[in-house]
Amino acid sequence: MSKITIAIDGFSSTGKSTVAKQLAKYLGYVYVDTGAMYRAVTFYAMKQGLIEEGDFNVEALIYQLPGIEISFKFNEPLGFAEVYLNGKNVERDIRTLEVSGFVSKVAAVSHVRQKLVEQQQKMGKDKGVVMDGRDIGTVVFPNAELKLFMTASAEKRATRRYQELVNRGDKVIYEDVLQNVQERDYLDSNREDSPLVKAKDAIEIDNSNMTLDEQFDKILNLVKITL
Ligand code: C5P
């Protein structure tokens, strides 16, 4: 059976990566979490002191970009690829609320996008890939055979993200998580370069009131129709 490209875009914390991982496992495809790449660059910038309390040294980040190497390595027990920054596993470091607080500013920088989009296109060039992000169906793979656009109410999304952070032991306040989710959606949707928009040919999935199983079944059906 010929392989296709599945592009999953949508708002923050809509469960894109959960369904992308399920699909990749089921189909034997590669899963690429492009948000992790923007988060890794943000983590790098924070560690280098390029972002501090509302102050972001964009020029320095652009200058240092060629030295930032992002890669993925499949973790067998986990069943998905973890993200590495210059050879170091940063999977845990990039998921903090602090990184979430800056990532949309870093993702608005065109030089950063160019570098990461080029890498994403290379990773998906042979198809057989499920890629999730904000611009996959519009910019990275505008010819993807299946495009999904995920939505859910802001409260549902913040509750899910809050639970995720609490489960891994982070001390966070629900209201801060909700505010972050809303702020990121605003910044991602209103930036000049590759804003978050639903591709004309994307299928919208509102999972506010769907169980994970219901969502997977619905999306798998769409995949089967597309194959
Ligand atoms: O998917 P995740 O929520 O981890 O993404 C973190 C951030 O990375 C997003 O809020 C967005 O600013 C940025 N991003 C992007 N383009 C992508 C993936 C993520 O701008 N393709």
Image: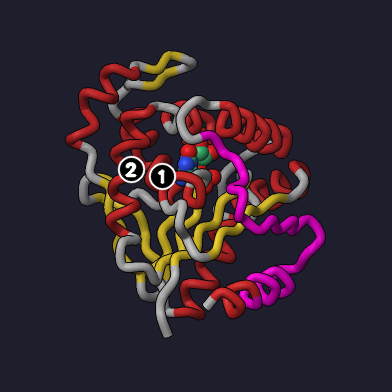
* Residue displayed at 47% across by 72% down: 24
Residue 8 position, x and y percent, is 55, 57
Q: Is residue 73 magenta?
A: no
Compared across the picture, whether 180 is left or right of 21 comes to right
Mark 1 CB lies closer than 8 A to ligand 1: no
Mark 1 lies on a secondary structure that is helix
Compared across the picture, whether 51 is left or right of 137 comes to left
Observer-nearest of 225 and 113: 225
Q: Residue 116, labelled with which disc?
A: 2
Residue farthest along the left direction in this orientation? 67
Q: Residue 93, labelled with which disc?
A: 1
Which residues lie in the magenta part?
195-221
Q: Residue 155, labelled with which disc?
A: none
* Residue displayed at 54% across by 59% down: 17
Observer-nearest of 225 and 73: 225
Q: Can residue 158 be seen from the camera position used here?
A: yes
Query: Which image quadrant is residue 201 in?
Result: bottom right
* Residue displayed at 36% across by 75% down: 76
Q: Is residue 219 magenta?
A: yes
